Image: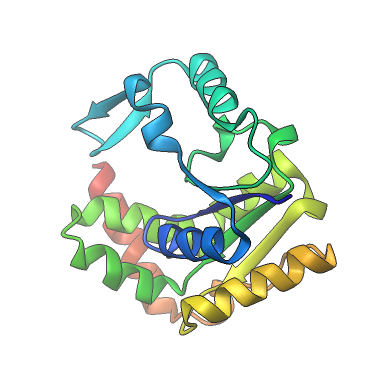
Amino acid sequence: MVRLLITGSPGVGKTTVAMELSKALNATLININEVIRPLLKWDPGLSTNYVIDEKRARELIKGRLSGLDSYIIDTVAINLIDRELIDWCIVLRLNPVELMRRLLLRNWPRCKVVENVLAEVVGSSLSMAIDLFGKDRVIEVDTTNKGVQDIVKYIISHVSSGNSVIGVVDWLDVLDTDFLISLSRELDGCQA
């Protein structure tokens, strides 16, 4: 039995890794957006969906997971997943320069790209995962320049050994100060 939650900033490879993990572990792959689709509403100002009823969303998710022994969930909305439904929360991280490149290739609005890249810089996904699931149930993975099979092996190894992994990524140690300043200025312009 394995119950994993895969999260991270948009563009870090969650869906790709979740698909490969579900094959490797013979676990059901759960697309949370499909489960809660009736409760999603598009916000054109933010260029994203939001959940109109979180309590009902939690009920739909619990219902979908009911009766499953092994599953892999891929989502950024980890706040909708009850702690007792997850054994491990896997937080995928990616060098912010590469993340910016990927998100720009998706033709996202520049301001949305900048917001997501800055969220990766400060580790907001990791911080939320620790807050919701605790340090002992989080595995942080730097996916930068790694193939999906290597990432899957790393995750399976740590899940099997029962060892959490946090604190392996600090983008502030590796990023150019000018890059960070330019992101900060762009964000200021987005909020003006």
Q: Please tell me whether residue 189 is drawn above or below residue 81 in the rendered image.
A: below
Q: Quadrant of residue 177?
A: bottom left
Q: Quadrant of residue 132?
A: top right
189 to the left or right of 165: left
**Rendered residue at 56%/22% (across/down):** 63
Nearest to the observer: residue 126 or residue 34: 34
Q: Quadrant of the C terminus?
A: top left
Nearest to the observer: residue 105 or residue 75: 75
Q: Position of residue 90 (x, y in %)?
A: 62, 57
**Rendered residue at 46%/75% (across/down):** 95
Nearest to the observer: residue 164 or residue 27: 27
**Rendered residue at 42%/30% (across/down):** 35
Q: Please tell me whether residue 44 is drawn above or below residue 103 in the rendered image.
A: above
Q: Position of residue 111 (x, y in %)?
A: 24, 52
Q: Please tell me whether residue 124 is drawn above or below residue 158 in the rendered image.
A: above
Q: Position of residue 13 (x, y in %)?
A: 42, 64
Q: How is the image coloured?
A: rainbow
State the count of labels.
Answer: 0
**Rendered residue at 83%/68% (across/down):** 161
Q: Quadrant of residue 24?
A: bottom right
175 to the left or right of 26: left
Can residue 104 be seen by looking at this rendering?
yes
Can residue 165 be seen by looking at this rendering?
no
